[in-house]
Amino acid sequence: MYGKPLPVVSVPREPAGTFEFITTKKDELVGWARKFSLFPYPFVTACCAMEFMAVSASAYDTDRFGAALPRFSPRQADLLMIVGTVTQKQAPILRKVYEQMCEPKWVMAFGVCATSGGFYQNYASLPGIDKIIPVDVYIPGCPPRPEMVIDGIMKLQERIAQGRHPIINETF
Amino acid sequence: MTVPLFDVLQQEFSQAGERTAVSHGVFVIELAPAQLLPTVERLQSAHAFDVFLDVTAVDWPDHELRFEVVHHFYSTTHKVRVRIKTRVAESSPAVATLRPLYGSAGYMERECHDMYGIVFTGNDDLRPILLYEGFTGHPLRKDYPKQFEQPLVPYRF
Amino acid sequence: MTAEIIIPNPVRSSLVGHEREGSVIVNLGPSHPATHGTVQIIAELDGERILRTDVHCGYLHRGFEKECEDHTWHNLIPYCDRLNYCSALINGFAYCEAVEKMMGIEMTPRTKYLRTLLSEYSRLCDHLTCVAASLMELGAMTAFLYLVMIRDYMYEHLAALTGARVTYSYSRIGGLAEDLPPGWLDRLAEILDQYEDFVGRVHGLVDRNRIFIDRLRDVGVISTADALNWGFTGPILRSTGVPRDLRKDAPYLAYAELDFQVPVGIKGDNYDRYFVRMREMDESVHMIRQLMDMLPDGPINVDDRRCIFPPKTLVYNEIESLINHFKLVMEGPVVPAGEIYLAHEAPNGELGFYIVSTGGGVPHKVHVRSPSFVHMGGVHLMLNGYQLADVVTTFGSVNMIGGECDR
């Protein structure tokens, strides 16, 4: 990229055999199932809630992507959508909710306040939720248009589809 | 726009130590903290100011009496507003509470205490409402730096 | 995963340690669908009946007032939108009118009528959101989808005017950002017709529905005396029977010239609040139709260089306009020293701005008297004594907006 040739690094890797083939196919299957049946936990706080309602409603439907049914218990959800500003007062609650979710779980920072604090750079607002929990997808916008949210969900689905999904133990 | 009630209020409250004015349609009374509670009782009982709108404070760091506590009232019968301003010093920022007269004073006095540190004597519930337990300092004072964070959960990076 | 972190509790409840015999303390929120995300209700229950509640707000305190003291009078207009984000235009108009009064500026006639029209349009969006959310929490998903559909048409329509769907930053000190694009008023007439169709369907689904009436009638009752004493304004006060509305009592903008009624309720319960909001929406549509005919032509910005930016051709060619533009951007418009309290009738009640200026380009203090915050102080009157499941309906009818409540 940008005209400068990148060095080629050789990575030592075992030759792929039958076990790896089965694992890859299993990962693809489980990834396909998981990406099309996301159960979001909408951790809704502020103005982005308006666009969250709009993106869940009929005009821009998240049901098409399988992410329609919100589960308001962290034990039953796998996608934590932080919608809106998280303040310092709310941070312990967010941390608790994140830790109560079971693996596999993904985190989506919806809106620019969740991504980086937005234009609230003061004593009260957390400058981005990645200060306290790891985030998979960031959706900027104040608030983001519903099309951007759908783009974010699709990027997350790509990431889930291409990821590793160990279901029995760490290798399989 | 002359409001006849304002003339009545001016006659009643323009005594020693109180100054009155009209600012953009709101009748303003400036008085000492000791006169606050009797004045508000009089406004509520005699002049039907039945809605307590707001209490807040203004920080004048260069003045000797640093905080100016501002109360707003509204009358649904006369449809006018009254503003009462008192000045307190930083060393003893105490003002009488209006909770016995108006229920809405509870939360608003908690917020004023949170933001400025004004103590409302007689209000025993001055827990933080907009801020959290463990927050030290009063953010809306001019000497509190805007970006001084006091996180409850330690940052990952 | 990580080392052990002790997660502290950000609030201290007044109920813990003072429970009665045989009661249970339960925590709802602050991450809860029914409390609209940012309010924590700690309730003491006797079975399913609520004995006492302790309402904690402040989880969305974003430091609006502190931010305002750091920004010029123009730069803080986007912060105003995020107060009551369901009806973002009204906050900006109230703030700009307060600053205009302090500067002694009279807005142009076109701006006056256009601000009134857009205020009523925003009121529609807010009431639609409130009713849609509270119906969804009761399980009426179809009504939610209908109302959010019509609200989406309104958002797209406002995006054609202002550039954004939810938070517009549209009002300016001395006028507005942009004038109406061509065809905007025709689309507005279409949307109002579609609104009547959609809302008619919701009325048919919900108004005489046995379950709806059983859940909302005589639930969350508040008396007029209590409501006034605890600072309730807006639809909650009107649902108790008093026709108090700032648009009629102390008319501002163009409301004195409009013909509209103020709907009131009978008992002050949740059903009355639902119906007051539905009728207020119809009155808003009636007002918008009148305003569409009354809109005069003319400029939208006052010809006052203290706050309005000079046109770009002059800025690039004349040194005076260049300096004017520079000063407005870098230092902000100079607002004479003084203070003002100005209130508008927001969809939730009386939204007041108390602004103190020391004569510079940056405010000394901007304080918002937010209706939702005051309502949170009194909502325990409507929750105590009812069932735990009634918290959902009562909270939905109070329409607590976090951005306004906690600022």
Image (cartoon, coloured by chain):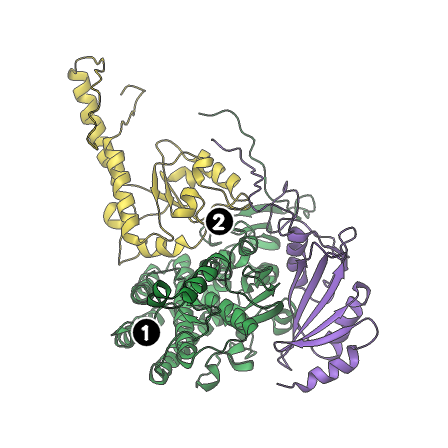
Residue located beneath label 2 in the image: A120
Question: Would you call the spot at circle 2 few (<14 residues within 10 Å), some (14-19), or many (20 or more)?
Answer: many
Q: Is residue C275 left or right of residue C371?
A: left
Q: Residue at x 41, y 64 (%)?
A: C319
The chain painted yellow is A
Report which residue position mark 1 lands on.
C200
Q: Colour of chain C?
A: green
Most extreme residue toward the right is B16
Look at 46% across and 83% down and name the residue there.
C261
Q: Position of residue C279 (x, y in %)?
A: 42, 76
SS under mark 2: loop
Chain of residue at mark 2: A
Q: Is residue A100 visible?
A: no
> According to the colouring, which chain is purple?
B
Q: Could you tell me which residue is drawn at 66 percent across and 71 percent down?
A: B73
Neighbourhood count class around disc 1 (C-alpha, 10 Å): few under 14, some 14–19, many 20 upward:
few
Q: Where's residue B105, x and y in %?
A: 67, 62
Residue B17 seen: yes
> Contact (CB < 8 A) between labels 2 and 1?
no
x%, y% of residue C384? 60, 59
